[in-house]
């Protein structure tokens, strides 16, 4: 933040409303990118201010005209400055990210959770899974912060979940979240290069939100994305390197009636061209029907 902006703000701003207006102005002036939870400068400013002041995140209006103490004002201005000048994603500034109705701890060892699979898990993957109570084993490949593993445990109450990631650092974050949700008896974290350490294990459901950013798109990502682990985003020239491994090995790890659900970003056309014989079912999510595919065990065999 420009030193003049900061000094003027610290001397002039008094209320939450003042800080909100100031933050929105600074965010818009800086041309920040919003793709890690909030969709615009206003929502991001409101979230950061409420979080910093330990106020309910869903109740801005009652506090708009509340006056801040000097220390509170400095805390708010500090997080506005870091977001503006360093372009750090809000989730890393607060160590908090939301997926569905659940909040997760995050830091720069994992990507900020965002997955359309979360929407599908809220519906227990209906109608593709007809009896959620009969799902006994689930694999979450490329688990990161374990957010999808935890959502799976909530959706399928009788299931035990293996959550796999190549990164030991990511699994440290995952362990924090699994413990926080008291799911250590149902979620097993496994450090593995994809299926390497899963020999002989079979699952009723395999889900994955793997790296899927192609080389050209990765080179063009806004600065905010550069804080995220590259290996959790980039997946080769066409964005399909990791998805290829999943498709190659999924059949041997699915039960006879098992299903595979994978998110692949904007790569539907490239995927269908690369695997013309696979009968992909494209699932409807809030953004459309080209981001998440489903395959049955028999499709892969």
Image: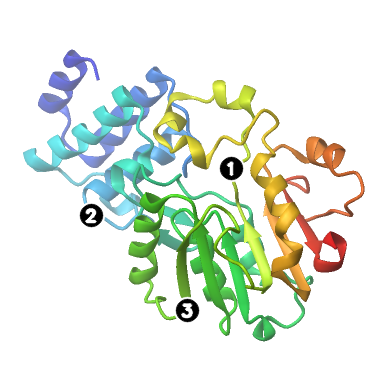
The secondary structure type at the circle numbered 1 is loop
Left or right placement of residue 57 versus residue 38 in this view: left
Left or right placement of residue 181 versus residue 295 in this view: left
**N-terminal-most mark, 2 or 3:** 2
The secondary structure type at the circle numbered 2 is loop
**N-terminal-most mark, 1 or 3:** 3
The secondary structure type at the circle numbered 3 is loop
Give me the C-alpha separation between circle 1 and circle 3. 25 Å
Please state, as top left, top right, bottom left or bottom right, where the N terminus lies in the image: top left
Q: Name the residue under label 1.
A: 211
The disc label shown at residue 54, or none: 2
Q: Which residue is drawn at 61% across and 34% down?
A: 213
Residue 92 at x, y percent in the picture? 34, 42
Asked whether 46 or 277 is in front, the reply is 277
Give me the C-alpha separation between circle 2 and circle 3. 32 Å
**N-terminal-most mark, 1 or 2:** 2
Against 29, residue 109 (above or below) is below
Left or right placement of residue 69 versus residue 182 in this view: left
Residue 211 at x, y percent in the picture? 58, 42
Give me the C-alpha separation between circle 1 and circle 2. 34 Å
In this view, the mark in front (2 or 3)? 3
Q: Residue furthest left?
A: 70
Q: Mark 3 points at which residue?
A: 186
Residue 232 at x, y percent in the picture? 51, 42
Q: Residue at x 42, y 47 (%)?
A: 110
């Amino acid at each position: 933040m420009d030193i003049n902006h900061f000094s003027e703000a610290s001397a002039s701003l008094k209320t939450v409303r003042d800080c909100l207006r100031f933050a929105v102005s600074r965010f818009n002036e800086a041309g920040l990118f919003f793709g890690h939870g909030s969709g615009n400068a206003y929502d991001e400013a409101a979230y950061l201010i409420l979080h910093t002041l330990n106020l309910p995140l869903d109740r801005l209006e009652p506090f708009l005209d509340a006056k801040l103490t000097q220390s509170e004002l400095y805390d708010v201005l500090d997080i506005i400055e870091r977001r503006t000048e360093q372009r750090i994603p809000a989730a890393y500034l607060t160590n908090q990210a939301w997926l569905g109705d659940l909040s997760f701890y995050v830091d720069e060892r994992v990507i900020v959770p965002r997955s359309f699979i979360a929407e599908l898990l809220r519906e227990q993957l209906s109608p593709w899974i007809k009896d959620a109570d009969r799902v006994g084993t689930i694999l979450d490949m490329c688990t990161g912060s374990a957010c999808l593993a935890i959502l799976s445990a909530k959706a399928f109450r009788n299931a035990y979940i293996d959550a796999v990631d190549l990164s030991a650092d990511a699994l440290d974050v995952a362990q924090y979240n699994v413990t926080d949700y008291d799911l250590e008896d149902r979620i097993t974290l496994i450090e593995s290069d994809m299926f390497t350490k899963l020999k002989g294990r079979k699952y009723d459901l395999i889900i994955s939100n793997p790296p899927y950013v192609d080389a050209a798109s990765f080179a063009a990502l806004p600065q905010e994305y550069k804080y995220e682990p590259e290996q959790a985003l980039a997946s080769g020239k066409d964005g399909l390197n990791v998805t290829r491994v999943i498709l190659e090995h999924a059949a041997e790890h699915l039960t006879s009636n098992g299903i595979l659900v994978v998110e692949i970003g904007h790569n539907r056309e490239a995927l269908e061209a690369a695997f013309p014989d696979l009968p992909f079912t494209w699932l409807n999510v809030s953004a459309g029907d080209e981001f998440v595919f489903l395959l049955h065990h028999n499709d892969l065999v």
